Image: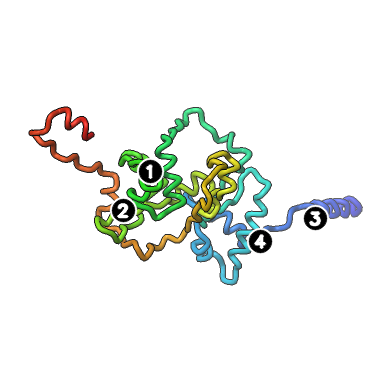
Amino acid sequence: MAGLAEMRVEQLEDFESELPAARPEELRLLEALLFASSEPLDQAALAKRMPDGVDIKMALAQLQADYASRGVNLVRIANKWTFRTAGDLAWLMTRESTETRRLSRAAIEVLAIIAYHQPVTRAEIEEIRGVVTSKGTLDVLLETGWIKPRGRRKTPGRPLTFGTTEAFLSQFSLENLGDLPGLEELKGTGLLDSRLPGGFSVPTPSDDPALRDDEEPLEAGDLELALVPPLEPESDNSSSGGAAAGGS
């Protein structure tokens, strides 16, 4: 009987030695917070929930490394942290009922200009494109949540300035605006003609949300106004139908 008891003790010790080491408490806390949150969390918000003395930056790096080879990865988007399905498994989450809404060429051009040149006004967008930009194009982009009014330019008329949002970064899997492709990358993908004029450059966008010196804060109602169609000018009764058609 003694020999059998000793054998069982040895088997139990062998089993316990094969168990994985207990995870550090701060990693378990981070996992729980990130898993339970319905939206990405920034480092400061996570640090407030950690015990005193925890190096939050190091803990996040460790947790990210732990999940690097799993089906779910810890990623940073717009300087916030969240769990996402691993990129190579994204096809598992595809739903046949998902409807893809294609943006027009004009909308894609406007979105690219805003991303690279923000903060930028509608007039500045038109100057860069060389064509008039319809308000409908901006409305479509505002409805996607990828752009938003930032402020008003300190110029006559005080036009709205536009910039991208965290939803834009999330949609295109960008950690920050600095991850946007540069000149050589755009040439390599064929999005830019390789025969560009001398001195041509692609601006480096900034993630700084602070208003520039030439911007002033939005006023109450500015966000709603951005989506309200402009009033059509009253037609002149003395104008002929042909003249009205020609001016449209």
Give the number of the mark in front: 1 or 2. 1
Give the number of the mark in front: 4 or 1. 1
Element at badge 2?
A: strand
Q: Residue at x 13, y 39 (%)?
A: 234
The label on residue 17 is 3
Asked whether residue 137 appears in the rendered view, the answer is yes
Q: Which amino acid does label 2 sit on?
A: Leu
User: Are there few (<14), some (14-19), or many (20+) residues within 10 Å of tag 2?
Assistant: many
Going from N to C along the chain, the mark reached first, 1 or 2, is 1
In the picture of the structure, the residue carrying the numbered disc 2 is: 160
User: Are there few (<14), some (14-19), or many (20+) residues within 10 Å of tag 4?
Assistant: few
Q: What residue type is labelled 1?
A: Gly
Q: Which residue is drawn at 36% across and 45% down?
A: 126
Quarter holding the C terminus?
A: top left
Instruction: Give the side of residue 8 with respect to residue 114, left or right.
Output: right
Using the numbered discs, state the Cα–Cα distance from disc 2 to disc 3 in whole angstroms: 65 Å
Residue 193 vertical placement versus 66 (above, below): above
Q: Which amino acid does label 3 sit on?
A: Ser
The label on residue 24 is 4
Using the numbered discs, state the Cα–Cα distance from disc 1 to disc 2 in whole angstroms: 19 Å
Q: What residue type is labelled 4?
A: Pro
Using the numbered discs, state the Cα–Cα distance from disc 4 to disc 2 in whole angstroms: 49 Å
Using the numbered discs, state the Cα–Cα distance from disc 4 to disc 1 in whole angstroms: 58 Å
